[in-house]
Structures are given as structure tokens and as C-alpha cells.
Image: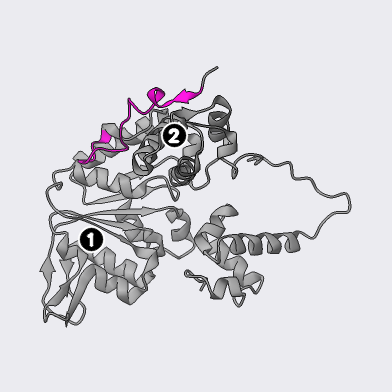
């Protein structure tokens, strides 16, 4: 049995998307990906002003938003993306709606809603914005009016809002963390992006594509992977999805000493089991203590990044915040020194 070569996948799928983001060139021929691509095409053609992308981190939400924009009648107008969860409320408001206070050059600062007039604004991690900003965004969706911070004049713009989240917004609504009216406005046209573990056969295609990509970038000549290695890659659950697979192939190609990648080229995967056999000790255990230790380990492994730590434990960020408070971990050094500290 020979190794899987680039010709088995790369030639048929030369790039994740072309420069003009054609939907049919997105890599993936599994049933769930074919359905997702058809849905993206339908949404792109629609005139709906709001779209909700639902998918885990690393499933390509940014790519999907660009595909929608560049295959719509707004393609010749701006596409502007912003990560909502990374900005405090006041700064996010200024970024979206602009400032009347003059900048260094003496001109007021337009917000991205004005800058993207006739185009598309992509709001990633929309579940991370405050309830006050959710109300402000809802008002904008109702009247399309922009008022800059510290300014009275109102400007009307025409933009499509594409919102994305890995959070269960219905649950957030029930828990009082997300505005129900805003949720109803955003979910008019939802698109579900499948996790990589459900995309049967797509890992092989993506591996071929990424090998070709990094061959060109690093001037390498990797021909493919061994059957054992592709079996290892296909068996992994890829909790961080396509992004994690891409990073894994990048490292393997960069460090490869042979022109065919084998199991040894993926040391972080070799020996792992995605379904470990946990057994209750005969003497029993303290479940609360075990939970606390797992939370600490997840935070230490991610240097206090609450989103990644929550994902390691199969939790959302609210559930992680609850456990940090429950176990009194707010003052731990790995949290205080982290770039994204738990609040």
C-alpha cells in the first residue's frame, strides 16, 4: 500500500478558495460540507441584511463570511471584520459607530458601519458583547442609523451584518446573557459550519492542500503521507478544527527530513487516544477536587486563556467563569498574567 500523494487531493482542490472567494472551490466533499456550501451560496444570493454563522473555533467562520460577501451583489463594496469579544464596550462602540472627537489629522473618526456602507460588516464572537451594546446593535438593525460618539447628526447606511459565534445563543437568551430580540433578528438566515470531526473524507483533502501550501512557502518537496500517518490524522478528533490541522501540517512540513510524512512527523498526535479509558479507582475519588484540578490544568495549559481552556473541557466561557469563581482561582498567577484574563 503506497502513501497518499498530493495527486489524490491537491490537484482537484488547488486552493481553499480562489482570490474571488468562489464557493465551489472551498475544500470539502463530505455530505455536511456540501450542504454547508449550498447554504452559503443561497445566503450570498439573498438580500437578507443579517446572517448568523454558527460554528466552533477553527471551522472557518471568517472564510465563510468572506465567501458570502464576495458572492453577493455587495462584492464591489467594503468587507470589514471585527472580533467583538476582544474589545471593551466603549472601544467596541467607537469602532462600530465612530467618534466625533477629532483624530490627530483633525478629522472625526468614522466607524466601520460607515466605512462599510453598501458592503458587509462581519461581527465575530458576537456573544461576547455587553447587553448595552447588544441593545445599541439591535437599534441599528431596526433603523440603519449611525450616530458617532459625542456627535448629534445621524447618518443612514446600508450594510449587511454577518454575526458569528461558537456559543449557544438560545441558551444565552434563556440565561439572560443575550438580547432575545437581537437573536431573532440575527438568526433569520443561520448557517451551521460543521466541525472537522464530522466531515468524513475531508481530512485527506485538507492534508493534501496544506502540504502543497507549505511546500511553496518553505520551498520543501514533501510528496505526501504514509497510510499509517493519514490513518492517525483521520482518527484524531481535531478539537480546534481546520485551524489545528493546518498548524499541525505546517509544523510537520517545516521540520520534515524526508519527502513523505510518517507517524513520527506528528509527535503530538502519536500515542494519543481520543477516547481514553477513564476508570473509577476502587477507593473512589473526590469529584469536586477532580473538577478543580482539571480546571487548573486547562488554564495552565492555555496560559489562562478562558476560551481555549473551556474548549479543552467541553465547556463554554460562562461555564468556565462559573468554575473559576467556584474554586476561587481568580488570583492565580496563570490568570493574572494572561493576555485574556478571566473577569
Residue carrying label 2: 207
Q: Is residue 174 left or right of residue 26?
A: right
- Percent coordinates x, y for residue 27 in the rendering: 35, 33
Q: Which residues are magenta?
A: 3-23
Residue name at image x 36 percent, y 39 percent: 213
Q: Are marks 1 and 2 in contact (CB under 8 Å)?
A: no
7 within the magenta span = yes
Q: Position of residue 330 (x, y in %)?
A: 59, 75
Depth check: 107 or 327 in front?
A: 107
Q: Quadrant of residue 309?
A: bottom right
Q: Is residue 201 visible?
A: no
Q: In this rendering, is residue 151 above or below 274? A: below
Give whichever of 275, 104 is nearer the camera.
Answer: 104
Mark seen at residue 141 = 1
Q: What crowding class fits label 2: few (fewer than 14 Cα within 10 Å), some (14-19), or many (20 or more)?
A: many
Magenta span: predominant SS is loop
Distance of label 1 from label 2 (alpha carbons): 41 Å
Which secondary structure lies at badge 2? helix
Within-10-Å neighbours for mark 1: few <14, some 14–19, many 20+: some
Q: Is residue 319 above or below residue 11?
A: below
N-terminal label among 1 and 2: 1
Tell whether 168 sits left or right of 139.
right
Q: Secondary structure at mark 1?
A: helix
Amino acid at each position: 500500500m503506497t502513501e497518499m500523494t498530493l495527486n489524490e487531493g491537491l490537484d482537484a482542490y488547488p486552493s481553499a478558495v480562489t482570490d474571488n472567494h468562489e464557493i465551489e472551490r472551498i475544500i470539502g466533499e463530505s455530505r455536511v460540507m456540501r450542504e454547508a456550501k449550498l447554504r452559503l451560496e443561497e445566503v450570498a444570493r439573498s438580500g437578507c441584511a443579517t446572517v448568523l454563522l454558527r460554528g466552533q473555533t477553527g471551522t472557518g467562520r471568517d472564510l465563510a463570511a468572506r465567501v458570502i460577501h464576495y458572492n453577493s451583489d455587495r462584492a464591489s463594496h467594503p468587507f470589514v471584520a471585527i472580533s467583538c469579544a476582544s474589545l471593551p464596550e466603549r472601544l467596541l462602540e467607537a469602532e462600530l459607530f465612530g467618534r466625533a472627537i477629532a483624530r490627530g489629522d483633525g478629522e472625526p473618526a468614522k466607524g466601520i458601519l460607515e466605512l462599510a456602507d453598501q458592503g458587509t460588516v462581519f461581527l465575530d464572537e458576537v456573544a461576547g458583547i455587553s447587553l448595552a451594546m447588544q441593545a445599541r446593535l439591535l437599534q441599528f438593525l431596526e433603523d440603519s442609523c449611525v450616530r458617532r460618539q459625542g456627535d448629534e447628526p445621524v447618518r443612514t447606511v446600508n450594510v449587511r451584518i454577518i454575526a458569528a459565534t461558537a456559543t449557544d445563543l438560545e441558551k444565552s437568551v434563556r440565561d439572560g446573557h443575550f438580547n432575545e430580540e437581537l437573536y431573532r433578528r440575527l438568526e433569520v438566515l443561520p448557517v451551521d459550519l460543521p466541525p472537522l470531526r464530522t466531515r468524513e473524507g475531508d481530512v485527506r483533502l485538507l492534508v493534501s492542500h496544506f502540504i502543497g501550501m507549505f511546500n511553496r512557502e518553505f520551498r520543501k518537496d514533501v510528496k505526501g503521507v504514509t497510510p499509517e500517518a493519514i490513518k492517525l490524522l483521520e482518527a484524531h478528533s481535531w478539537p480546534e478544527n481546520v485551524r489545528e490541522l493546518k498548524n499541525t501540517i505546517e509544523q510537520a512540513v517545516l521540520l520534515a527530513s524526508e519527502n513523505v510524512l510518517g507517524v513520527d512527523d506528528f509527535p503530538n498526535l502519536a500515542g494519543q487516544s481520543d477516547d481514553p479509558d477513564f476508570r473509577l479507582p476502587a477507593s473512589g475519588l473526590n469529584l469536586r477536587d477532580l473538577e478543580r484540578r482539571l480546571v487548573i490544568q486547562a488554564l495552565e495549559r492555555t496560559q489562562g486563556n478562558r476560551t481555549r481552556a473551556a474548549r479543552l473541557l467541553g465547556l463554554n466561557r460562562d461555564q468556565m467563569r462559573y468554575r473559576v469563581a467556584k474554586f476561587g482561582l481568580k488570583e492565580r498567577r496563570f490568570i493574572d498574567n494572561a493576555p485574556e484574563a478571566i473577569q
